[in-house]
Image (cartoon, helix red, strand yellow):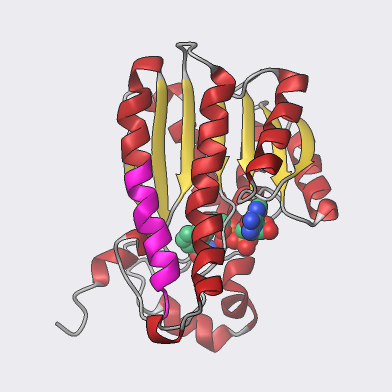
């Protein structure tokens, strides 16, 4: 990854922060795109540099077309077109059933988790122009792309839509050498799962359903992202790779 430019969204927290660090350890140039917390973004950038990579921080809301354009332009002005996009920015499900969900709740989730993926992907692609060469887009999706949950219609719809976005882009961009894949994590210990980290009993009740008996670490997801971005994964495109300790295989409980 030395000299490769990697843009990571949501890079100030959780899986995105772990990805930034992991690509830093591969000596990549990492653009830490963040939502609002500049101190957390600087911490991610410091982790990149500690690993031997280069880092810049750029603020951008992924659901804002102008902000995404400006952020990518800033990265390109320093390092040229990006080689890898890791899209980790996202919001968790509202926890509201469809009959109680407001349009604003629905839109907020879809705008971030699905439209954000479209906007960052499109800008990544247009930034590269018609050039043919090795490049990779990796979206952090979820097992909820297909394993639905009551109260998660907004999130499940966004991640389900993301699957089709990934597969469509995979066939559109394959001739240019751009691979497009999704990672589908199960339960990962990040701020998105804050309750599981402060409430041991709650965490145990969730981990009880995971065949491997434990939640995942963000670094484990980051290792997969590095692999999918690397030449070792050169024939993998349009894939949705599950990383969940076996959780999604347990759908038949009670059947
Ligand atoms: N933690 C899990 O168990 C888990 C499981 C499956 C999938 N995921 C997915 O992994 C991704 C990362 O989640 P995480 O667990 O690291 O959570 P996290 O909350 O730690 O990180 C998400 C980041 O996205 C940023 N963000 C939110 N809205 C944004 C916007 N509009 N523009 C730019 N940035 C925005 C947040 O500020 C935050 O830094 C998400 O897409 C999530 O759906 C997480």
Q: Quadrant of the N terminus?
A: top right
Asked if one can make out residue 113 in the rendered structure from this viewpoint, the answer is yes
> Residue 49's x, y, as percent?
78, 34
Asked if one can make out residue 217 in the rendered structure from this viewpoint, the answer is no
Magenta segment, principal secondary structure? helix
The answer to if 240 sits in the magenta stretch is no
> Residue 14's x, y, as percent?
63, 57
Q: Residue at x 39, y 50 (%)?
A: 162
**In the figure, residue 180 lies in which quadrant?**
top left
**In the figure, residue 176 lies in which quadrant?**
top left
> Residue 116's x, y, as percent?
55, 49
> Residue 45's x, y, as percent?
78, 41
Q: How many marks?
A: 0
Q: Is residue 242 left or right of residue 19?
A: left
**In the figure, residue 2 lies in which quadrant?**
top right
Q: Is residue 24 above or below residue 177?
A: below
Q: Is residue 154 left or right of residue 67?
A: left
The answer to if 156 sits in the magenta stretch is yes
- Displayed-image quarter of ligand 1: bottom right
Q: Give the camera-side residue of 211 and 174.
A: 174
Q: Residue at x 44, y 21 (%)?
A: 231
Q: Quadrant of the C terminus?
A: bottom left
Q: What's the magenta region? A: 151-165
Q: Is residue 103 left or right of residue 17?
A: left
Q: Is residue 7 above or below residue 252?
A: above
Q: Residue at x 37, y 63 (%)?
A: 157
Q: Is residue 225 above or below residue 246?
A: above
Farthest front residue in view: 103
Q: Residue at x 60, y 85 (%)?
A: 199
């Amino acid at each position: 990854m030395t000299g490769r430019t990697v843009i990571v969204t949501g890079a100030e927290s959780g899986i995105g922060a772990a990805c930034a660090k992991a690509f830093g350890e591969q000596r990549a140039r990492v653009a830490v795109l963040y939502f609002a917390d500049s101190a957390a973004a600087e911490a991610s950038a410091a982790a990149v540099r500690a690993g031997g990579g280069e880092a810049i921080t750029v603020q951008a809301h992924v659901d804002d077309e102008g902000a995404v354009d400006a952020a990518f332009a800033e990265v390109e002005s320093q390092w040229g077109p990006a080689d890898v996009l890791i899209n980790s920015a996202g919001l968790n499900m509202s926890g509201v059933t469809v009959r109680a969900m407001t349009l604003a709740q629905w839109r907020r989730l879809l705008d971030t988790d699905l439209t954000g993926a479209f906007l960052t992907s499109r800008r990544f692609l247009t930034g590269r122009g018609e050039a043919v060469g090795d490049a990779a887009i990796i979206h952090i999706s979820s097992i909820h792309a297909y394993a639905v949950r009551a109260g998660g219609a907004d999130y499940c719809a966004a991640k389900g839509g993301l699957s089709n976005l990934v597969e469509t882009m995979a066939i559109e961009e394959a001739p240019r050498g751009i691979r497009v894949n999704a990672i589908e994590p199960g339960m990962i210990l990040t701020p998105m799962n804050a309750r599981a980290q402060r409430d041991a009993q709650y965490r145990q009740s969730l981990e009880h359903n995971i065949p491997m008996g434990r939640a995942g670490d963000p670094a484990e997801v980051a290792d997969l992202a590095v692999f999918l971005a690397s030449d070792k994964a050169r024939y993998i495109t349009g894939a949705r790779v599950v990383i969940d300790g076996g959780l999604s295989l347990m759908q038949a409980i009670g059947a």
